[in-house]
Amino acid sequence: MATPSSGRKLKASGRSRNDVRSLKRKREVDDHEALQKRVDELDPKAEIKQFSDLPLSQPTSSGLEASRFKTLTEIQSKSLPLALKGKDILGAAKTGSGKTLSFLVPVLENLYRQKWTELDGLGALIISPTRELAIQIFEVLRKIGRYHTFSAGLIIGGRSLQEEQERLGRMNILVCTPGRMLQHLDQTAAFEVDNLQMLVLDEADRIMDMGFQSAVDAIVEHLPKQRQTMLFSATQTKKVSDLARLSLQDPEYVSVHESATSATPSTLQQFYVLTPLAEKLDTLFSFIRSNLKAKVIVFLSSGKQVRFVYESFRHLQPGIPLLHLHGRQKQAARLDITSKFSASKNSCIFATDVVARGLDFPAVDWVIQLDCPEDADTYIHRVGRTARYERAGKAVLFLDPSEEEGMLKRLEHKKVPIQRTKPREKKQQSIKSQLQNMCFQDPELKYLGQKAFASYTRSIFVQKDKEIFKINEYDLEGYAASMGLPGAPKIKFQKGDDAKKIKNQPRALLSSDEDSEGDESSKATKKPGVRTKYDRMFERRNQDVLSGHYSKMIANGDQDQGADAGGDADEDNDFLSVKRVVPVDEHSSGEDSDLETSGPAAKVIPGIGREPIVIDSKRKEKLLKSKKKLLKLKEKGTKLVFDDEGKPHQMYELEDEQAFRQRGTAESQRAKFLEEEAARVREADLDDKQLAKAKKRERREKKKAREAAEKAGDDEEAPELVDDSDHQDPMALLASLPLADDEEGRAPKRPKKWFEDDSDDEKAAKKKGRFIEAEDEPETLEDLEALAADLLE
Ligand SMILES: Nc1ncnc2c1ncn2[C@@H]1O[C@H](COP(=O)(O)OP(=O)(O)OP(=O)(O)O)[C@@H](O)[C@H]1O
């Protein structure tokens, strides 16, 4: 391709525009042919040291030069000649050793040599496991590819699908995350991949593992089989099944640390400290306090752990800027945080494994692994955030005594040199009481702590390597206390969960809104209720990591029911939950009463079922004093019966088994019970019948008397038939009312509406019929006798 300077020279010589164009084209053709020839002649085993010695196009060479890349790293020197020749590559090299250029340079070059244009569609697809890494790769591509005319795009979600769809059709090179890419392949009609020449998987072992398995397999299904495929990772494997899944053809395995004595950079110093679970927050805080001028990354096992440690340490103000990063933050916030950390000279970032792979933060001094990594590979990637590209760096792994033996064995097996160190006694300080205080005063922090505790315990429980992670050997009570919690929350475990599968699940599957800090389900289920000043406060304070937790706490008040539904379904997947045992009167006296201390004007109505209600204004107080309102909030009560001594009992209680057996076998007791009950029913039946008979007789007599009075035309005397005592007795009064068949007492007939059918009339007639039947139906022998006597009369 002609550079701007060559164009100016040609113009100056006075040739016509067409001449210039055809000359330019010829030169390009010559360039391409010469370049192809150089590549064909390139010895793949040649030890090339400089980029300038490689057969590279002018735009790529210029881009590398402008980015100040001159000398090749070992992995680049070994893999680039092969990759430029179009070979499939399995590349393995230590963290920070320059793998990114090992695949980006061939991507640019191989498309360039094929004279790829916009009309040719997608030529290369680069897949990364995380958004941050995809962004980073894209940035490097932009830097070294700045003189090329290819169009390149970043497909990582976080913006509207439609927006991405519109641009997708025009892209030559795409950097993407698996989930989003698959979404486009399935949904974007104009997106053609039939022409694809190259597929690259960065952090390939991670992309090929369980969490991404189905997405990656589905993506590969869409791609043409005839292509160049390159896999890179610091922990690359030669798993045959993976190679088959990606249909690699005679891949070249390029490994630069297989023969090395260590799998980690030689400039990295690695230590571990034995610190029981209950002391590790103290040790971490003491460490941070002693390294205020350093740039530190602290790895934790879950987003909730990250949030709790970040939030509580922030309150303790250790004297160094604190940041936190996890997969559930909004994309913009994540970008902001990564760039803040990159730019900072001294700061401490608490993070999940979302930053463990590939991220190239400059000049990180320390990598602390507060929670033990799930395996040695994760360890290697985490420590790889420091000591990058020949720089020095230090890493400390915190190990519970129960984890020591198992983890050291795994690290040794992976050629990780690590030595024990001890925290300085003098510098060790305890933050336990401060955390207790904070949790007591701040229910949100306590809630966050409980969630963090649960997620930590869960992460231990679901770990596959039981030689390292022995759940019963951790001092969980002590850990809860060290977090400032009033007790270890009860955790309900569900067996059969696969740690890696859950952990590695693409976010799109974990939550429908992969960017949202909170989860959709809780949004959807949140009922409109009384907005308290705390609600308003948290809406304003949406920068605070706790606000999401507060709203969940409110939305998911039935924690104590052990339900945990809706609340944290996003991350917990509901295979375990915090299960607080709340005594009946706890709200009034125990734990949650500290809600009261969180606002001077706030009151808490305790013990009305699911959650305390914070009242912050007189109007609301009045509102809630209404019995009707309270009844709505109340759970349905349980019916109790009281014995002679006034003790409450459930309606149905199981009696003492021994006493039951003493009374005979169940069968005999049943027979006896049936017999007794039958006798009782017979007796009651008799009484009922007699009563009914007496009433009927009375009614008949009254009717007769009334009829007699009517006949005599002496209507005024009729009421006299109802004596005084009858007025007191509602039954008697009812009996004096006109009967249903009595014309006078009948309600005036309603005019029939047009849309009415006759069924109502029929029903009424039937009803009437039944009523008359019931009135006159003889039930007993005495009834029949009375009826006969009536007839005879
Ligand atoms: N040839 C080179 N000359 C100078 N610097 C280089 C060269 N290659 C890479 N680097 C620099 O080295 C650092 C690490 O490179 P890169 O991120 O590619 O490492 P990596 O092997 O992919 O690491 P990880 O395994 O952690 O993903 C980057 O800052 C990059 O700019």
Image (cartoon, grey):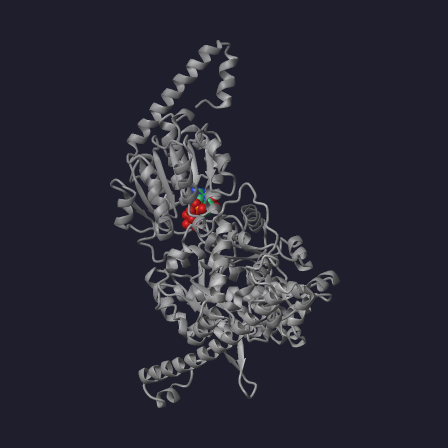
Residue 156, x across and y down, in percent: 47, 42
* Quarter of image, res 77: top left
Residue 152, x across and y down, in percent: 46, 33
Q: Nearer the viewer, residue 351 or 616?
A: 616
Q: Is residue 194 above or below residue 556?
A: above
Q: Is residue 59 above or below residue 599?
A: above
Q: Nearer the viewer, residue 392 or 792?
A: 792
Residue 668, x across and y down, in percent: 32, 85
Left or right of 254 in this view: 335: right
Q: Residue at x 41, y 32 (%)?
A: 189
**In the orientation shown, which residue stands out farthest toward the bottom?**
662
Residue 770, x across and y down, in percent: 47, 61
Q: Nearer the viewer, residue 750 or 246?
A: 750
Q: Is residue 83 above or below residue 263?
A: above
Tell how many labels.
0
* Quadrant showing the N terminus: top left
Left or right of 112 in this view: 539: right
Q: Residue at x 36, y 47 (%)?
A: 204
Q: Is residue 134 visible?
A: yes
Q: Is residue 369 visible?
A: no
Q: Residue at x 61, y 52 (%)?
A: 748
Q: Nearer the viewer, residue 177 or 15?
A: 177
